[in-house]
Image (tube, grey):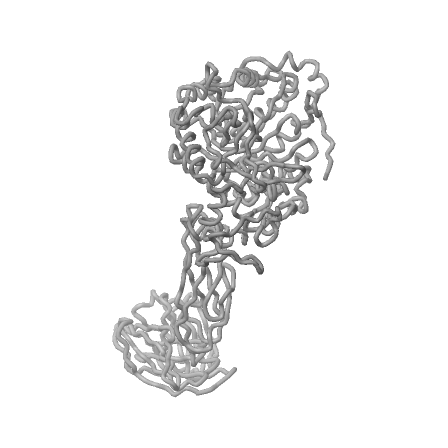
Amino acid sequence: MRFIRLTSPPNYSRLLTIALFLALFSGRPTALLAQRELILNTTGYGFDRTAPNGINTEQWQYILKFANLKYNGKDASPTAVRLHIQWEHYEPTLGNYQRAKMAQAVKAILDINPNMKVALHFSYLRPGYWNDNFLSTVDVAQLSNGSLMREAISHTVPSVFSEYATGRFLAFVDDALAQVQGYSSRILYVAMGNNGSEEFYMPNKVVNSVNYAGMFEAKALQAWRTKFLPMRFPGQTNATWGRTSYPIATAPQPTDGNYNSEMGRDLHRFAGWGLLKLFKGFYETVKNRNSSIKVLHFISDFGSVQGNNWHLHSSTLLLALELSDGIYHTDGSHQWDLWRKIMGIDVIKGTYPNKIAGLEFDPTDLGQPGGGSGINGGIPYEWFPRAYKHGADYVHIAMHFNDIEMAQLAPTLALCREQYLTPSYQPPARAEAVTVNIYPNVFTGNFLFETWNQIGGQDFGQTDLKPKSIRMTDTGYWENVWEGGNYLPCSYSVNVSNSPSKPVVGSQITLSVNCQGPECNTANYVWSGEGANNRTGSSITINAPNSPGDYNYSAKSNRSGCVAKSAAKIVPVTRALPVKLINFTAVKEGQQAQLAWSTSEEVNSEKFDVERSTDGRKWARIGSLPAGGDVLNAVTRYNFTDISPVAGENLYRLKMVDRDQTFSYSKIVSLNFKTSSIASTYPNPASERVTIAADDWEEVKSVRIINVAGQVVYSSDKPRREIDIRNLASGSYIIGLVHDNGTQENIKFVKEAGK
């Protein structure tokens, strides 16, 4: 573990002397703030049905002190209050909802000042059995030793797998939200928890230094056998782990606490699946009530052994982040491991930059001595701004700060309001994300994001200016679990393409998946088809089959939280072309068309049919030339004259025919024969000057003169009708005209000796 020397803000020693006199002045914000927020938590005691305004009296006084907090005349108050709502306070008995008090409580907070916001935290807990009989024992979480997770006074922990308990909880949440519907624009977010520490994770209890998970009640066992295992082993009647096989209908849950055995891994998945199902129910309840309200996944540690093997929520991180609007985590337990808080932000923002990232600081985090009072004011002055620099959207003030601690915290809060909670502030650009797959480490006690440390995540001198980013994946973890139904919306679509579109036998084909939709970013693909079976990736390259024909290739998506999607493509594989054509040209010579082409390779070729068309639809063969047959690594040239082209546009193509009568076509070339614009020269023969006559002279782009040896002896891109030829030797020449449309026309003339 790395230890960091903490520094105090300027003049901090004077603060301790005068802070109490400066801290508690009234004031209110003057402008709406940006997305970043500074949130005061009500912890344990928030909503209270017996209080005049629906908020516990002591907590209300605590809220007001923070709401009026100033430092050196500067506003040091939070921008929002998170109201903790115990189930039994809103619904003390079945259906006895405290609706009026709920509305009163939220209104009281929002009335503190016009810009105040509120967050709501709902607790999936009931009181101990001495004071509450809302749930029967079958709906209470149970340890593997048979003990129910309930105390006489403090808490009863409902089963994550009880449809009755979760149904009643979600009804309570929905009813409470209905009472504050009119304030929805000022509700920052809602979250849920199901443990005494308020976060959301699999209930657990330590007995004689051994950690036990609360997922062994009868309803959990029923869900294991009737829902989870049939998805995990689709179409099978037995569940097999290693050499051991059980009928699914009677398969036991392992109780040895080893989550890295084959059977233990499935119990681990079962825990994550149960938590995610409950969280999805909560998420949908909120969104069905008001889709504009944000929902956060509220968890404790972020990727440590506790989250992996005790709280069993580490496996939920990615899917819960993808489903919800963001994650609020509470990792980091004292001043020496505050780097864990920043690490969590760097993972959230590295995975989904536009999702909300939240964290918290309590007095213990900020240097409060065990059993003592007071915090080290230098710690929040360093770490609150750091959180915002790394992209935190919501920074929470958690647990309870006494008056002295409030004053010690005030300079930091004023600094944050002045510098980081303004619309003009934007966190620095992040480093490119490094991908970390939580599988299979999530089954172990290993820290999941050690890569963050390895790439310098704790080098805050650098990372405060350019935060590191971790892109989290869970590839391989869920196996078949989501084949029974989508967890996410899964609105993405896939199709398959191939290049080239018509490959020849034995050549390379690139098969690619084209994915569109929000879930594409972590989708993986498995291919099937000749030469592609069990290949993985969004794009693969294979050799085409050795025989021509139509071949079916398909890709199946493997995307956590979604039923697999498949796409297929028929790929036509053809024989190799009999001819490798280098070029094919057409040139006018008077009233004739001179066609020329050359090849670099001919295999089993028989002939070239020359075809002509006037409209590109109907073609007629006007001649044929025998091919070279089998010619490798040599250039073969061919010429053909169309002695009677038609007036107007003439289109030409080659039909290259193999000995087995398979064929392919060349590109199309064209010439235009306009009888009224046939070019000529005069005089002819000529000795000193030759003049070119052409009706479409303005369309001539360049002129060349070529001798009988094929050498260009004159060339001009600024053509003139009259050309001086006194320097040319006696003999025959061709004048070549190139038109703006690319067509060529040749005119023969004779240079005679000068007189």
Judge whether residue 702 can be spotted in this image: no
Asked whether 655 or 136 is in front, the reply is 136
Judge whether residue 220 can be spotted in this image: yes
Asked whether 393 or 29 is in front, the reply is 393
- Screen quadrant of the C terminus: bottom left
Residue 249 coordinates in the image, percent (x, y): 46, 52
85 relative to 666 in the view: left or right:
right
Residue 342, by quadrant, is top right
- Screen quadrant of the N terminus: top right
Residue 488 coordinates in the image, percent (x, y): 44, 46
722 relative to 331 in the view: left or right:
left
Asked whether 40 or 28 is in front, the reply is 40
Count of numbered circles on the image: 0
Residue drawn at x 72%, y 19% is 13
458 relative to 559 in the view: left or right:
right
711 over 151 or under it: above or below: below
